[in-house]
Image (cartoon, rainbow, N blue to C red):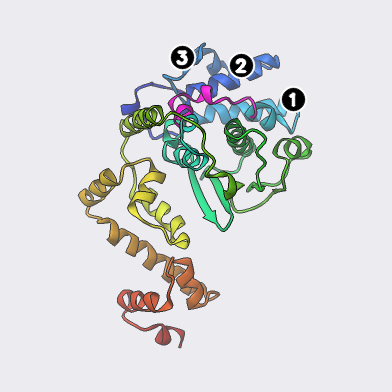
Amino acid sequence: MILINASLSTLKPTPVVTGGEALRLKLFLLDRKLQLPRIFHRLARTPDEATEEWVSERLLVDALEEAIRVIRRPSLPVDFGSTIRLADMGIYGMAILSAPTVSDALERSVRFQRLMTTSARIYLEQTKGNVRWIWSSAEQRTLGIRIRNEVVLVEHVAVFRALVPGAIPRRITFIHNPPSDCKGHVCFFDCPIEWGMDENSVEWSTAALHLPLNIDPALSKFIECEAQRRLELLSPIGSLNQVKDVILRRLSTGDTSISTVAAVLGRSPRSLRRELADCGHPYRTLVDSVRRQRAMEMASEGKHSMTNIALKLGYSELSAFSRAWRRWFNQSLHETNN
């Protein structure tokens, strides 16, 4: 059964997307007179009805793959993804649209992601002068998943341009190889595109992040609270590995605070701390455990200096890393190198 019950409190572990996304694809295919998968005929017919549904992501992936095989148009992800409107995204879109600044809008796109889909994770990584919006999916790299990843990045850029008209990304990266014809992608993104990379990401200049969006503060706060309320109705954080994965990705940034990790997971710091404590994993202990495991893995690879390992683990000083190493393995860095 692909159609998922609308109740947020009973959301299934199966990766899902909102019915609004599925309805957009249904209308897009109908407009191009393509044959619809049978399950599409059971979807809601209006946007208002669609926002109350959850649909298996597999429906979108299979439909996208079938569509591109039929019409043989490499720009299909751009054609479809660029039709996105914030109004199509329900409370998730409203939370982004009502953010006080562009930076807040990006942060909300990460924090409230689970209101839109459970099929992947979104991360923000900030470096000097740039911020990367990363779409991380653990799904196999089938043709359908490749198209889905392209659609998501196109949608992100389209939404960003709704907030900042004419905005041009610094760089786009995809984990898969390029399609046979990239003209549509190049024209839409209007920036360098790199294929076969480690992540699907959009890189923006931080210069635009502090632009005010002229939103009424009371309205912005009201919608943010409503989005947070709905987020809290979703299922708990799930496996401990999910929390560890976020911590691991944050190590090199030096920011593994519980407030940051909780935001990525769409939780409040208080509820995340409580859930971890109930499972017997105090947050600080968990971060230390992730650091220890990663340090052991990197050291065993034999190609990283201890200074490099320290930096990758978020230590600003080698002395602090040295003390941690002795505590973890009961030996000094000097003894390890020898």
Q: Secondary structure at mark 2?
A: helix
70 relative to 153, above or below: above
The residue located at (59%, 30%) in the rendering is 162
Q: Is residue 261 left or right of residue 93?
A: left
Mark in front: 1 vs 3: 3
Residue with the mark numbered 2: 27
Residue 113: % across, % down = 45, 36
The residue located at (39%, 35%) in the rendering is 13
Which circle's residue, 1 or 2, is located before the other in the chain? 2
Q: Looking at the image, which is closer to me, 120 or 104?
A: 104
The residue located at (30%, 46%) in the rendering is 269
Q: Looking at the image, which is closer to me, 212 or 127?
A: 212
Q: Is residue 200 visible?
A: no
Which circle's residue, 1 or 3, is located before the other in the chain? 3
Q: Is residue 316 left or right of residue 184?
A: left
- Asked if the residue at tag 3 contacts the one at tag 1, i.e. Cβ–Cβ closer than 8 Å, the answer is no
Magenta span: 82-95
- Tag of residue 48: 3
Measured Cα–Cα span from mark 3 to mark 2:
15 Å
Q: Secondary structure at mark 3?
A: helix
Residue with the mark numbered 1: 71
Magenta stretch, overall SS: helix
The stretch drawn in magenta includes residue 326:
no
Give the position of the N terminus as an image quadrant.
top left
Measured Cα–Cα span from mark 1 to mark 2:
16 Å
Which quadrant would residue 319 be assigned to in this image? Answer: bottom left
- Name the residue type under label 3: Asp
- Name the residue type under label 1: Ile
Residue 39: % across, % down = 53, 18
